[in-house]
Amino acid sequence: MTASLVLPRLIRTGSGAFGEVADLLRRCRVVRPMIVTDSTMAQLGYVDRLIAHLDEAGLAYGVFDATEPEPTETSVIAAQAILTAGLDGAPYDGLVALGGGSAIDTAKALAVLGPHGGRMRDYKVPRIVDEPGLPVIAIPTTAGTGSEATRVTVITDPENDEKMLCMGLAFMPVAAILDPDLTLSLPKRVTADTGIDALTHAIEAYVSRKASPFSDQQALAAMRLIAPNLRRAFHDGEDRAAREALLIGACFGGIAFSNASVALVHGMSRPIGAFFHVPHGLSNAMLLPAITRWSIPAAPERYADCARAMGLVGEAVSDDHANEALLADLQALNDELDVPTPAGFGISPERWQQLRPLMAEQALASGSPGNNPRIPTADEIIALYDEVWR
Ligand code: NAD
């Protein structure tokens, strides 16, 4: 089997890297960027800091700061109007995404809709979007999605609530800045949800049927960084070392899954997010223990490697014992990070029950369950939704 690797051209990391944004833009030949961000970034003063860096470098820019969490196509279209209008009659030549996965995914969608037009649903899988888009420079402020280093964007179709997975080279940022200082302000809940999202990327990339030696190394490195630091950052948001480890780990997790694909957890998670407005990382967290338990028999040695990389057991421990430790820790992590059950989140049991067949259909259509070590039928996915509810 061959494997194909796709990465951003430039990644700059470390405390203070945010201050080098103008230099990065120069290296990417972007002179008139549109900033894509959200109101929280503006309130935190991050947008002013970005603008100050661009002013200092003499760069002209536009700003769209109304990105919505878990973006729908509607909010992307609002941003598209600004992109199309251009700046003083001249077109924007790049996008700077400042924020979590929602801002970065919005910028990626614009990078394609801007030059090529159409609706987002025209670009969803199974289509692979390799046409060149506008260059995106991604500055993540959550340590979760890894979107700064993935050839993926996720946009919800407002007409049917489908969280559309869109993939291809056009969605890979040209450059990324990983400055852990920007993540110090993350609230506890977002720290937990995004951290479990990153851990899920790493585990699913490692057990994916499309895993390669390259993605394996990124996935294992991600688990080594995320597992020991997520609880630390959750309990002490000011823990800089933990924040930095999580940001780098999340980026590794993104690289791993972007090159190996996610699997059943993500396939089942997107419909929960779209129908019940559960943040992406949280819906992954609700599913991760049960889906891992169901999947282990098809790849016990791979899941055991995950337990070892997470530091849950030593190298000499048997696969069975390692997998018991993995399942126990995933549940303990959810408990410690206050992850609610679907009922605890406030989802109505009747609506969950009623939507299970459609959610299973959408999960299968995304293609992600086909990468799982144990591939489910639609009925098995419905049964797993039942189990997760219980
Ligand atoms: P998010 O971007 O939706 O942010 C969550 C909340 O945290 C928002 O209110 C945001 O304003 C706030 N926030 C972000 N950074 C902050 C900071 N430093 N301080 C304080 N508040 C901050 O969350 P996310 O989990 O990063 O992104 C979720 C989206 O990413 C979903 O739509 C999901 O489907 C998508 N996703 C994309 C990929 C990909 O590869 N493209 C992968 C996984 C998930």
Image: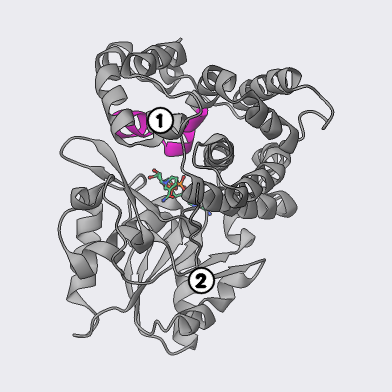
Looking at the image, which is closer to me, 330 or 140? 330
- 132 sits left or right of 253 in the view: left
Residue at image x 15%, y 58%? 118
Q: Which span of residues is magenta-colored? A: 269-285
Q: Secondary structure at mark 2?
A: loop
Labelled disc at residue 369: 1
Looking at the image, which is closer to me, 28 or 205? 205
- 326 sits left or right of 354 in the view: right
Instruction: Give percent across and percent down for residue 107.
Output: 34, 61
**Membership of 270 in magenta stretch:** yes
Instruction: Give percent across and percent down for residue 240.
Output: 71, 54
> In the figure, residue 64 lies in which quadrant?
bottom left
Specify which label sits upstream in the sequence, 2 or 1: 2
CA gap between label 2 and label 1 equals: 30 Å
Residue at image x 44%, y 29%? 264
Residue at image x 73%, y 23%? 319
Residue at image x 61%, y 30%? 337
What secondary structure is the stretch in magenta mostly built from?
helix
Say which amino acid is labelled 2: Arg
**Membership of 34 in magenta stretch:** no
Instruction: Give percent across and percent down for residue 219.
Output: 62, 45
According to the picture, the residue beneath numbered tag 2 turns out to be 9
Say which amino acid is labelled 1: Pro
Query: In the current view of this chain or complex, which residue is farthest to the front?
Result: 1
Asked whether the viewer can see residue 210, the reply is yes
Labelled disc at residue 295: none
Query: In the current view of this chain or complex, which residue is farthest to the bottom?
Result: 58
